[in-house]
Structure formats: structure tokens, C-alpha cells
Image: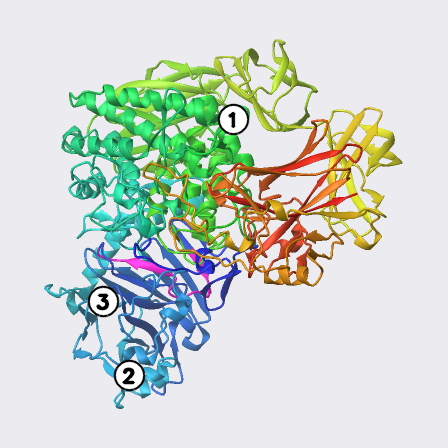
Amino acid sequence: MKLPGKRQRLKFSQFLRGGLAGLVLLSAGSVVLADGPANRPLRYTPDGTDFVITNGAEVFNRPLYGGNAGFRVEAGDRPEFAFFLPGRGGNLRLGLRLDQTNSKAIWLQDAKSIVARYRPGAMVYEIRDPLIGDGSWTVTAIPLAGTEGLVVRVETSANNGPVKLLWAFGGANEERGRRNGDLGGERVPLAQFFALKPDDCRSNVFRLRPDGFTLPLKAGTVMGITSGGDAPAVADAGQWASPGELRASVGRATATPVLYGEMALTPNTPALLAFHLVRPGQLPTLRRTGLTEVFSAAEKRRQELGERIGVDTPDDYINAAAAAVSVAADAVWDESQGAFMHGANSWRVKLLGWRAAYAGDALGWHDRTRRHFAGFAARQNTNAIPDRLPPADEKYNLARNETALISNGDLSYTDPHHYDMNLVAVDTFFRHLLWTGDLEFAEQMWPVIERHLAWERRLFRRPFGPDGLPLYEAYACIWASDELIYHGGGATHATAYNYWHNLMAARVAKRLGQDASLYEREAELIRQAMQRELWLADRGWFGEFKDYLGLQSVHPNAAAWTFYHTLDSQAATPLQAWQMSCFVDTQLAHIPLTGRGVPPGNYQLPTTSWMPYRWSVNNVALAESAHTALGLWQAGRADSAFPLLKGALLDSMFLGACPGNAGMTTPLDAFSGERYRDFADAVGITARALVEGLFGLAPDQLAGELLIRPGFPPEWNHARIRHPGISFSFQRDGLKESYAVESRLPKPMQLHLEVVALRDAVASVRVNGLPARWRSVTESVGLPRIEITAPAAARHEVVIEWRGGAPVMVAPESVRALGRGIKADFGPARVIQVNDPQGALTNLTLRGNGFEAVTAGTLGRRTVFAQVEQGDLNWWQPVVFELRPAWEIIAAQMQDAASLRFRVRNNTAGDVEGDAVIHFNGRKVKAKLTARSGRDSDEIVLPAAGLPPGSHPVSVTFADGKADGLVVNWKLDPLRATVRWETVNLAPFFNDRVTQIFRNEYRSPRSPFCSLAIPKQGIGGWCYYNTQFEVDDAGLRAIAATNNGVFPTALGIPFQTPGDAQAKNILFTSQWDNYPREATVPLNGHASRAVLLMAGSANAMQCRFDNGEVVATYTDGMSERLVLHSPTTWWPIEQDYHIDEFAFARPEPIPPRVDLKTGAVRVLTPAECNGKGRLIPGGAATVLDLPLNPAKELKSLTLRTFSNELIIGLMAVTLAR
């Protein structure tokens, strides 16, 4: 997304982009819940390549594009049409009349039965209504071929006597709206935005002709031609709703004119209407006598687009989606500008990014990709390179450094911009060379590429470690960049991009006779840096980024883009790729698609699990899911890739408001909802996912090789794609598989066909009728594969005959207890070796067809790989299990005022049954415990009389072991607590007022590079650099002032805090130089717990991460630690987290919140917070507690901040004596 560069002051609610709203309006009568996965029925059903709906309610929801320009026609589920020029260019209505009295007249969109078909590139309606007799009427609307306009054909086979086709046109006020009249982008639903209103007609001056009309407008002249009938007449727009009343108004004087016309409609003789936007300087081309040919040309053009990649699979949804993507890809191309637009409707502007240009090569429009890149290359910044980097821009509150960004090497500098769109453009360029092998173009562009790579090194290369290995900072270099802030750190996705680009630059340099050594060395250094600095070996994935400042921590909670860019850039080994795919399985929420008629088994993904929400950092977007699916295919995970891509296509194209829509965000997006239609970023990468992922086509014309690695579901027995450059088909008949490959690319290529083994032995392989050699792909992970290599030829026909037994399958994921035994049995396969990259095993012993070991290492989902051999096959078989403690305390989410409720979870292989002793808060209770293997016990309810609200350690001891855990219950009755509370005087240690948190300027330490950073006020982002939030603690102070400096709470816990409005009332720590990194206050005596009142900032870039800690130290040197982890224990001062079951899942107990402006104390459960994230007027502090050992004497309490950019503050401490 592109944002305005001018200074702007935004309210925090704008910064959240609708965070206070729970609904996204689509059109009249259509509301989709935006704060969770609504149980949505299937709206559109595939029929061939058609998207079909019967009696749909939407209007103006499906654009039809014409002329490769900004012109379009808004059609929909019902046959009314609105022209967009850009700007509203008039509405067209169609009707039927069966008599002269107007009593049998109807607008077709009001008919009782309307079957609407989006036939990619056109709309076809089958209409029936009792009022107009038996039979049906068919309306077909298609954009004109090669120009801007629409042709409509109306026909019937019914013979109901004299029938008149009615048509009416008007309402061209040229209004553009906020987002070009696009879905989710206007202040009103589209049905309202495009509806004709009489006031829209006041400026229209029609010029009538015997065969139609012209309407002069600023954008040009709208010309309408009919195939028959008399000249239209002027009618009154005030009667637009009724065809009879509109006809009756003809001839009356009106200030709001529309046109009304009639044509005879007879069986088997179609009536045609055509509309053409004649731009200034153009000549009109429509003639009444040529409308049949005009329609035929339009239909031919539509077929060419819809069949750009002809896909035939057993899945009707995929077949229809492929046709829709082809049409959308043509829609985002602008011929006059020679470039792919940012979107077909909204954001229809020429921008270098994002992934739109992928569609050119993926769909065979190689000339378009070349023109797109060359156009920007001609504008590359070639200014002199400054001697030093300029500092961050003061006008953007230090959040950006556009002065450095727009410099030598930048490819889009002539447009004011804030992004590194170079990376995706250069990525598209190198992939273009793989498709075309166009060395002439490569030589022309080589200076451009060299300047780009030098620009990346100069601005974004970050040295790490004593040897300065390079990682690259991501400076707004992907679609989701709006509010991604790495503050000088090295990000995996930008680093992966640069790794592959340097590899490719080295290849191209050699072909061009240039020195490749710089790029070869840089690629190798980047590879080493990624493996050493970013790879989290015990978890099995690359971290999101590594801080350059502060503690140089690696942020483990990665985003979808970290996964897919690593795979797309070939920066992971095959075993790493598989492990990273498990990250997608476990760390990103899988949102099921459910509802009437929805095919089962598919899912959608959010891009992250980050909180609090800010635009772009946690969304559900077709492009992101499609790219993730492509990455899963590249990792060999077709089992996850296919249901994700299909789920994303269902979500956007079949369940949404617009049929066949390759939109931006989908109805499952918690904040944006369904937004924009045929968004170029989604179009381009979805095309790649279909072509390169599902069908596995990966040409390398530079090497003269064609790799095909199909990613079909195992139950498919046939599939075919007809690409302009490559045709590929697959057919299975029993144990015989046939593959046909025909290449029309510039050079014949050697074929490398990798297929999943159907059986463990190969009876024969033949290529073009002759025996052929093959090999077992020993590096394959998850499934055994064989590779057939055949010499270069225009056509290859490969036939494989399988025999033997089925290859051993991956065992279902299981739970294993830490420190317990684990066995793996591979049946008929022999284990050659075991690779344990995550350190999840000890005492490993191989035993022929399996292994035994003891589990170890980090808790969570772990993967071990066994290299196995079965028959003719050799591959790596993953063993996946979830590693948990042997026994766990699982606290109930719903607690009550009188007890502690929990269960004991048994993760061991044996049952537990017998006597148990429960220890809690110095008490001991005997109980009977039954916990079957892999299950929870019945709920255990402990009486909590005398216990204060808060966290309570619980230990359950039984014959086989012990379960330890924490039960948090902030709803315990404080009146029944038998503790004595003692407040601690922190006044000598306070270093500021809490209200100053966002009034300060945080200027150091900051990245010395060209970086994006949090604004100097400590809140907001690089997009919303003027964001402000006013903290107001008047209520807290007022209550404290009336209680001698003590703030009593409904929890029964008092806090000592100043009542004087000018007194300091918080001890801040931070990695900013404004405050100390850590601070210690003395304590004494004995206590069973410390209760803390805390406040500070939180940041989505620091989410699922330890932001800081509070450590209570005893006089004997031992200590207790409370981790300040976002979003569990650490909350932002300005808002409550938005929580739901998927993208914003957070099941842990909610800490109490104290609203500073009012002094109100809120105690909530996760269920009560679901979907209720909001700004808190004046802000809120958080109550946390730290259980202590009452037998030990206290010495001190230390507060530390780990995370960069955050401010963490302590307002009060109260001890339970």
C-alpha cells in the first residue's frame, strides 16, 4: 500500500485502521462479521470456469474490465451496470415490457429468478419471472475488445407475444470516491455508492441519435448504440425505480434527465446494446450494423484471456480460479503506461511493487514483464553517491530516512515514496530471465542491477559478529511493510531476497562476461550469516529479525513472509525447509472455512500472530496465503500447500462479495475485512502459486533446463495446464502414470521431472517411447520421489510403470513427554541414519527398521529425520512429535470467587490412578487422581478461603511423579483473604510521571543506517509518524489523594502512589537513553507475594517475546522472576489487546487493568475480552503479581527492559506479609 508523504496528524483510532469497529459493510443487506471466522455459506459455485449464484443479493460487486486502462463496468449478481471511466460514468438498466399499459413491465434485476454467472471477463444472466411469462431471457455483458466500452446481448427462445426490451441510462456524475469505488474502500457500501440518484443526473446533457446517443463528459464522450428500435428519449430520473413510471415520464420537462429506450425482442433474434468511451482525440468506432461483429470480437477476446492458462483438474474450484486470475492479470496491466498497476480498481497507480509483475511471466506475457521493468529502469536514480548517510528525517519524527533512500540505485525515486520496491522488482527481473533466457535484455539492464545491488549494500547491509557477516535490514520492502519496523536490525526476508539476487547476479555476470566474484562472495557471506545469526536450531526456523541495537536479540516469532521468502529465495536446505513448514503448521493460526456448501478440509492463515494490531502486521490476505502455499510446495509439503491455496481462493473468490475476486484482504481479516477487488499483489503471486506450485513448472532458460515438480493432491488421477510457454498434462491409470510436456519457450530444455513415488519399485520408465534413466531423489523430505532426466526436446512424453509396495507413510503427530522414551518404526523401510537438528533426542539407538531414543531439548513441536531406504527409494522421513512436560497443571479459564480450578494433564505413556497430595499456598490436601495417558484428569477444585486474588503455585505429587504449575484467579473474593498487605514507598526511586511516556523525545540510541524506526514520541510507526496518545492519570491521583497516598482497589490490594498531580509516580526503564536499562529498589522482610502496578508501551514488533523482567532477590542470593512477555503479562498502556480464537489468539489469564483516568479496576477473563480490544481513554496500568517464598528474606526488586523501543514502568509494589 502506498501512503501519502505529506505530514499528517492522525488520531490513534485512525492509526488502528478501524480497530474500534466490528463490522465491515459490503453492500446493502450484506454484512460480514470482521472479528472472527463467521460461518459463511458458499456464495458462488463453480461450473466449468463460471462462478454461479442464484438470486444473489449483491449489485455492482463484480468489475468487468476493458481496454487495459482505468475504465471498467460494475456488474453483479443482478443485471444492472455502472460505468467507471474513472469516475462514475452512468448506470444501465434493462427491462421487459409485454403490453402498452406498463402493467407488465419489469426491471430485470427485480426478476424472481436470476442465475448469474461470472464467466471470467463477462457476466451472463439467465432470468425468469412469472410476470413476463414462460421461458427465460439471457443477458450477456462483455467489455469491448481492445477499447473502453461494453456490449450487451439480450436474447430469448420464448415466444410470449410482442416483447419490448427496455433500457435506461444516466447518472454520470464522474465521482471517483475515496478508493475509485472499490470494495471496502468507500464510506458507503458499493450498492449505495453506484446507485443512480436523481442529483447525479443534473449535469448530463444527452445528444440523441436515431441509433443511440452521446454524452459528453470530462473523461471523454460516452457513446451508446443499439441494434434496433427508435431513438431514445429523455425521461425523469426521479422515476428510475419503476420502468412503467419512467416510460410515462418521457417528454416531461426535468432537471434530472436520464435516457429511456425500447427495442423489439423476438425469439432467436438477439438485441444488442454497445457503449464506448471515446477519449479526447479518438474517433468513434461503433455502428448499428456492426454490433454482432463487435460482440463476437469481445467474446473472442474474453475467451483468450480466460484461457490464458487453461487448467483442467478434478477440482472445479481450481479450474474456475485459474481463469479468474488470468482475467485479473490482464486488468492490472495498463497499456498506455506499459506497466502493471498497483490494483485494477483501488490503487490503480503505477508503482514498482509489489508482486503484480510476477503475473507477466507466470501467465506468458513476457513482453509485459520486460516493459514494466524497463520502464522503471529508465528512471533509476543515478545521482552522485553522497560521502555519508544522512540522518533520519526530522519531518517524519525520525521514523523514516527518505533522504538516504531516494539515492543512486533507487528505481522509483521520481514518485515520492517510502518503500524499497527495488527488491521485488529485481526479483521479478531475475525470474523473467529464468523464463526467457533473454541475455540481450540482461545486458541492457546489467548496469541497473549493479546499481541496485550497490544501493542495497550501501543502505541496508548490516554487519553482525566479530567478522561482520552481513544481514540486510528490511526497509518497507514487501506488501506488509506499513508499520514493519526493524530499527537497524537484520530481517530474514530482506536478507533472503539479497542472497538469491546475489546468486543470480553471479550467474548472469558470468553469462555476460562480467566479474561475478563480488556477488558470489556476498551470497556466501549472507548464507553464513543467516545460518549463524538467524537460524533457531532448537525450534527449526529462522527468526523474524536480529536486533542491531541493544541486546542484539533474535526475535523468534516469525511472520509468514519470513517463511515464504526464505523458501522462494532458496536460502534453506531441504531439511530446514521441512522444519520451517512445521512453523507454518504450528505458529500461524489455521482458520477453518466452514458453512453451508463449503468444501471441507481447507483453511486460511493470518500473516502473523503479532499484537497489538497495527495495519499490515497481522492480516488475512490472499497474496500472503498464496505465497505461503507456494513456499509449502517448495518445501515439499503439498499436503499443507493445496488446502491453504484452495482455502484462500474459496475465501476470496467463492465466499466473498465478489465472484472470482483476487482481492487484497478477505472477510476473515479481523480489522480490514474484505477490501479491494483484483488487487495486483494478489493476482501476481496467485498466478505463480498455481503455475509453479500446484503444477510445479520451473523453467530455467539460462541453464537450458525445465524442472517440473507437480504438487497435486495424491487422490488426483489427472491434471492439465496449457500455458502459453509450456503445456503439461498428467494421467494415472492404476500403476501407470503418463506425463506429457510441450515447451514453446525460446530454447529447447533438458527435462527434469520429479514425481512422488506411487510404489517402492519402478518397473519401467520410458521417454518418447524409449527406455530412460531415473534416480531416487535422496534429498527428498517427507515423501519419496524419483527424477527422470531427458535431453532437450520440444516435446517429452514420459510413462512410468510402478510395482511393489506402498512407501511407508509419515506417522501421525504424537505427544511425547520430556525425558521419556520414544520409538519410531518404519515398517518395510530400513533406517540408514538419523538426523536430529533440533537436539530433541538423547541415547539414540538404530534398530534396523526403526530407532529408539530419549526425548530432550526445547518444548514444542519437534522434528527428527530418518534417512530410510525402501525398495528402489531413498529419502528423509520426518518424525514429528510435540514435546511436553510429563505432567502439567492446566488451569481452568473460568475461575470463581471461592476456589482454584485446574486439571492434571498426563503426557506420559502410562496411566496415573491413585492417591495424590496437592500443595498450594502452604496448604496440603489429599485427593484421588485419575489421569489416563494423553488425557486430562477430572477437574480439581481447591477451596480458596483466605487466599488473595492472583497467581497461586500448585504442586500435585503422586506415585509416578509430580505436576507443578500456576493457577491464576483474579476473581477470588478479596474480603476472604487473610493476608496483610504492606505497600512499598517507591517515591525516592520514581524518575518521571506516567503521563510523560509519549510526550518525551526518544532520540538515542537509534540506527545509524537508513532505517525505519518508531517515531521519536515512542508511539506510532513509520507510516503514522505523528500518532499521539494522551495519558491521563487524573482519576488514579484523585483517589490516592483522598486516601493519604494510597490507591485502594476492588482486588483488596492497596497501592501506594502520589496524589499530587505534579509528583513523579513511575520508575521507567528502557533501552532508550532517556531512562536506565534497569533499576533496583530495596525490599526487606518476608512475603508470600509481590503485587505490582505497571505501565508502559508495547509494540507489535516486540510481540511473543520477553520484553523485560521483574526479579525479586532474597538475601541468600536466590531469586524469583516474573517475565514481562507480550501479549501475556505485558500490555500496552494505551489499549487493551484485541483477542480472538485465531489471528489474535491469547488464551492465558488476563491481568487486571487499572484505568488511569477514572481509577476503575477491570478484572476480565479471555472469554470476556474476546473481540473487545479497544483504546482506553487516558490509558491503563496493569496489575501483575509474583509469588514469593515466605520463608526467605527479601533483599531487592529489580526491573529490567530487554526490548528496544519500549518503555516499561513500575508504579507501585505491595507485599503480602
Q: Give the CA distance from mark 2 to mark 1.
A: 67 Å
Viewer can see residue 868? yes
Residue 1059, percent across and down? Answer: 64, 59
Q: Upstream in the sequence, badge 2 or badge 3? A: 2
Q: Which mark is residue 1065?
A: none
Q: Give the CA distance from mark 3 to mark 1.
A: 60 Å
Q: Quadrant of residue 1117?
A: top right
Q: Residue at x 30, y 71 (%)?
A: 92
Circle 3 is placed at which residue position? 274
Give the amino acid type for the residue marked by disc 3 in the picture.
Ala
Q: Are marks 2 and 1 in contact (CB under 8 Å)?
A: no
Residue 548, percent across and down? Answer: 41, 32
Q: Residue at x 27, y 50 (%)?
A: 341
Residue 1048, percent across and down? Answer: 72, 57
Q: Upstream in the sequence, badge 2 or badge 1? A: 2
Q: Residue at x 61, y 17 (%)?
A: 841
Q: Residues within 10 Å of mark 3 (few under 14, many from 20)?
A: many
Is 1092 left or right of 923, judged from the image as shown?
Answer: left
Q: Which mark is residue 540?
A: 1
**Callout 3: SS:** strand
Q: Image height check: is 112 above or below 337?
A: below
Mark whose residue sits in front, 2 or 3: 2
Is 229 left or right of 477, judged from the image as shown?
Answer: left
What are the residue bounds of the magenta stretch? 52-67
Circle 2 is placed at which residue position? 256
Q: Upstream in the sequence, badge 3 or badge 1? A: 3
Q: Are marks 3 and 1 in contact (CB under 8 Å)?
A: no
Q: Quadrant of residue 428?
A: top left
Give the amino acid type for the residue marked by disc 2 in the picture.
Thr
Q: Image height check: is 876 above or below 55?
A: above
Q: Residue furthest bottom?
A: 252
Colour basis? rainbow
